[in-house]
Amino acid sequence: MNATGIKFGLGLYTALFIVFLYGPLAVLAILSFQTGPEGGPQFPIIEWSTYWYKHLFGLTPPSRIAPLPIEQALVRSLTLAVMTMIVSTVLGVTAAQAFRKKFRGSGVVFYLIVLGMMVPGVLVGLGMALVANTLGIDRHWWGTAFVLHVVYTFPFAFLVMLAIFNRFDPSVEEAAWSLGVTPGRTFRKITFPLIFPGVLSAMLFAFTLSYDEFSRTLFASGRDLTLPLAIYGTFSVEVHPNVFAFGVLTTLFSFALLGTYAVLMGLSVRRAKRFAIQEEA
Amino acid sequence: MTMAATSHDTAAETAETSTRKQPDRTFWLLAPGVIWMLLFLVAPILMMVYVSFWTQTTFKIEPTLTLKSWVTFFSSDTYLGALWTTIRIWLVVLASTLLVGYPAALFVGLFVRNKTLSTVLLVLCVIPFWTSFLIRVLAWRPMLGKEGAINMILMSLGVIDQPIEVLLFSELSVIIGMTQIYCVFMVGPIAFMLGRIDPAVIEAAQDLGAGFWRILRTIILPLSMPGVVVGAIFVSVMVLGEFATSAALSGRKVNLLGNIIVTQVGSLKWAFAAVAGVVLTILMGAVVAALLRVVDLRKEL
């Protein structure tokens, strides 16, 4: 479209839109460098300091502001995220594998799986807590909360793998078998490299979603807090810049994950290209 | 591994045995996922419906069926107020995400012809989704507060003399926060649909003398409708199930159905929480069903 004025206006709007998306996080990052312990969570910055980062790691002298209970919570959240990642990726790959063949009732199964990502956490969380209470099961982050995390992330893994298998040419596998390559070697050399980008994406989705998940965890995890629950706990009290410092660190962690993903993805794409060139030659 | 092995077998064997083995293989591949969903998704939801008819005593619930919790819910101003607040906030946020998101989607999906630039812009929109949801909610506090960034900027620009206090701990702050958090889910699907519009269609309209607004109304808007509906479903489901944004930004002034569930569970009123949960489920189902009626997604996508 060549309406220059409109294009310029919309471009300007989109720039403002991105400021709207990132503005609050930027303000939060700036305020995390407020001086402490007397500096509050607002402007102006009295003095730039890394006090609240030290406060987070317990490196400051005790003050009236209690440290965030993150040490244990971090270990729990990371363990939970890894558990969720493994189980939901395995379930996602197997379920998507089944969908490569047409079968009766596939529509129902598809919607059943996708329902897991649509139903709000507060509802499944409540339901799970009720089931656990009735059966007399103790609620734990590694039990009742974990199975709900998988309910939430498995559909993402499933959809990603479904998209991968849709573009997957089965004749490549068949060619390998007909040439007498063992099934194990075929999987290692042919199938796995082809579905690897999908598996990687599914793992990234599952890990990140589980690491941030809290509405399901809130009802289903019992006494021990995960990281998001520790943050949620600060909502009802006065907020200090230590939460902001934590926000900056956890955002950097998410970016590091995304970066690792991008590098691994780049490597896999380059490898695929090298194979394509070999084939042509 | 199993996949490779069984496919190898079916390739080698006769058609008759393969049709016998095929459903078998599909069954075993699907069983773990389906059982997981039945046990940990369907059963909890059914349990919630069941418990909403249980008898609530002060500290516990007993499996004696009664309609009492339902009667309490629909005769209480607090609960009905929460239902109404949920619907109102949902409608406002749906409209605001659409209004705020559509122009950005229009630019990214239709006006940016450079593939790299449009990908970069979309990735920029999606990146916040990867950071902690709670931190993004909390980030609005230093923005909107009485001594917050927005008030500070407006005061130094001389637009206002007194800080605007209604910005934080009000319904407005909840709406602003939710709009920012959820508008990405509106932009994505709309930009995707707009990107699929054939430029020749728009050029033809221009050659025939149609102005921008006419093209927008008669071509772009109708063709982007499936994207709007998908975005609206995402936003609706997430906003209706919300409680954290209102907990963080409204200072307990805005109580959504989600907040009611959280407080009821906190005071061990499981049956009331279950009633609120069932009401929320019905509301959500009705909204999604209504949105799906607007556009036949299977046909359009």
Image (tube, rainbow, N blue to C red):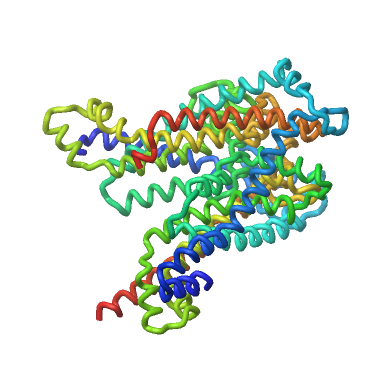
x, y percentage for residue A257? 55, 60
x, y percentage for residue B257? 66, 28
Decide if residue A278 is on the left or right side of residue A28: left
Is residue A73 visible to us here? yes
x, y percentage for residue A221? 75, 48
Is residue A93 visible to us here? no
Q: Residue at x 40, y 79 (%)?
A: A177
Residue A88 vs A124, above or below: the answer is below
Q: Residue at x 52, y 73 (%)?
A: B1
User: Foreground: A65 or A90?
Assistant: A90
Q: Residue placed farthest to the front in the image?
A: B16
- Give the quadrant of the C terminus of chain A: bottom left
Q: Residue at x 48, y 53 (%)?
A: A159
x, y percentage for residue B116? 32, 54
User: Foreground: A92 or A21?
Assistant: A92
Q: Residue at x 83, y 28 (%)?
A: B56
- Give the quadrant of the N terminus of chain A: top left
Decide if residue B276 is on the left or right side of residue A101: right
